[in-house]
Amino acid sequence: MNHVEIISWIVAFVLVTVAMTGLGRRIGWPTPLILVALGGIASFIPGVPSITIDPDLILYGLLPPLLFAAARNTYLADIRQRRDSILVISIGTVAATVVVVGFTASLILPTIGLAAAFAFAAVIAPTDTVAVTAVAHRMGLPRRAITILEGESLLNDAAALVALNAALLALTGSFTPLALAGNVVLAVAGGVVVGGIVGWLTALVRARIRVAVLDTSLALITPYLAFLAAQAIHGSGILAVVIAGLYLGYLSPKIQTAECRSAELANWRTVQFILENAVFLFIGLNLSSAVSGVSLAGYGLWSAVGICATILLALVAARFAFVYAVAWFFRMGPRRLRDQHVQWKSAFIVSSVSVRGVVTLAAAFLLPPETPDRALLQFLAFVVVVATISGSALLPAVIRLARVSPPDSIQEQMEWRSLLAEVRAAGVDALESELTDNDDVRVISQLRAGETLVQESLDRQLANPDEESLLASYERLRRRMIRAEWYATIKARAEGRFPETAVIKVLEVIDAEEAALRAFELEGQGSSSPVRRSRSWATAFFSRVQRTPPSTNRLNTRQRDKRHR
């Protein structure tokens, strides 16, 4: 294909991805399943280009930004609180899968040998970060289960690739226990150290950047810096990306301005949306080549079906057995472990959410050409990915069967209220300390009135939850005002009474307020609680008055001191 055809297919690829994602959300079907099915059908249509997986493109091109975006949006405080269970499950499930599936594959496929069987088991061991995160949040799982699933999916990719490297050493005949131990230590230590250094250095630079475009540009290359630097010293690039993402996500409120945070969030959402959904379509487009590969290997249809079913059964059994063993051990172990114990219902959910994805497919193509029955093993990896993605459609029924309680929205709102009360008090103190003789009394009155309005609304709603809060009233009236302001601006623009620069500035102000209002609407979907409905634009607006980053406060103080001197 020439360059024009390649660009045309890329544009069509993105358009189909966006359209099918919108369709999936509209009809309530899992988007990954729709994209995989569509890609699988398209792969058999004449004229559709044959897609071949380049493992380096996946591992070096797609995986770093996807992992970084997921880690950036993961709460480090929750990971810390449940770090023992996350580490045990993320590493242990990979080890259990390698052992159980490896021996199973060697029994039903005796010609491939134990080393190749273990390499294949390592390929299908890690869960997919993107799919697991999407499933966990869409299903309304308990907070504890979501934390475990997100933490596990972030770390088990690195564990699986370390296991795969060990199995590949055995395949080439250069495996020794000392070499394995050295590889594991270097991969883990190198990934952690490089990720920490890259995150620290990046944070130092970004703390001094106040231009959103520059800050976001640096953020976009950070995962590649961490990945390439770790790989250069034979460390785990995946682990380095995760560490850097968690660290920078945790420091974001301290080192970034509100504008930089908003811009970075919007950019990562776009990148993550395009890449993660394009990956599932890409997986489906490999169906025809995977089927042709297994047919060339000389296996019949029913033999392949039986082998696939056995592998899937071993995969599911290994995960359920290990997760339940961990849950029992944490319940019966020392006090530190008992404090992090996993409920039996949560263990059932964690065991059930085990979607495989692009890492599994990329790792399958890392198997060397001399691997026995390599085409069959790649086909089996493809089947595991498609089967687990398809199985995610059954998760709502699984959750209903387990009778798992969703996150307590009332409790979360009360926690939010308590924190809001604390930060309000800090804001009032800051206001009083910043006042000067030059500050207009009307500005001071407006700030104090806004603070009083928010606090009185929260107090009244606690006393009478069914009553329309002051904030709800403010939001209703402000919504109408915003709509009228927007129409007036558009009318003035059409009449040509103001220059375009003035119109754009006014529209930016109106759009910022409307975006804040829309954000709270989206956050409140799925709950009819009056408390949740009270998360209004007014709350966001008045909160932002008090949330200037510390670095900016210090800068303004220095500037004011200079003026007084």
Image: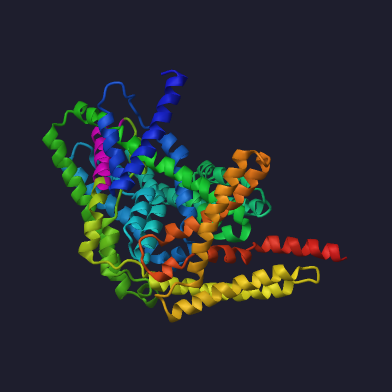
Q: How many numbered discs, if any?
A: 0
Vertically, is 40 above or below 238? above
Q: Which residue is drawn at 81% across and 71% down?
A: 437
Q: 515 or 215: which is nearer to us?
A: 515
Residue 480 counted in the magenta span: no
Q: Residue lying farthest front?
A: 495
Figure quadrant of the C terminus: bottom right
Q: Decide if residue 54 is in sight here.
A: no
Vertically, is 530 above or below 274? below
Q: 444 or 79: which is nearer to us?
A: 444
> Where in the figure is residue 106, as x and y percent of width and height?
20, 43
Q: Decide if residue 15 is in sight here.
A: yes
Q: Residue lying farthest bottom?
A: 463
Q: 534 or 285: which is nearer to us?
A: 534
Q: 26 or 413: which is nearer to us?
A: 26
> Where in the figure is residue 349, as x and y percent of width and height?
27, 61
> Where in the figure is residue 308, as x and y percent of width and height?
19, 42
Q: Name the chief secondary structure element in magenta.
A: helix
Vertically, is 399 above or below 159? below
Q: Residue at x 54, y 77 (%)?
A: 456
**Colouring rule applied to residues:** rainbow
Residue 374 counted in the magenta span: yes
Q: What are the residue bounds of the magenta stretch?
A: 370-389
Q: Residue at x 65, y 69 (%)?
A: 447
> Where in the figure is residue 112, as x and y percent of width and height?
23, 37
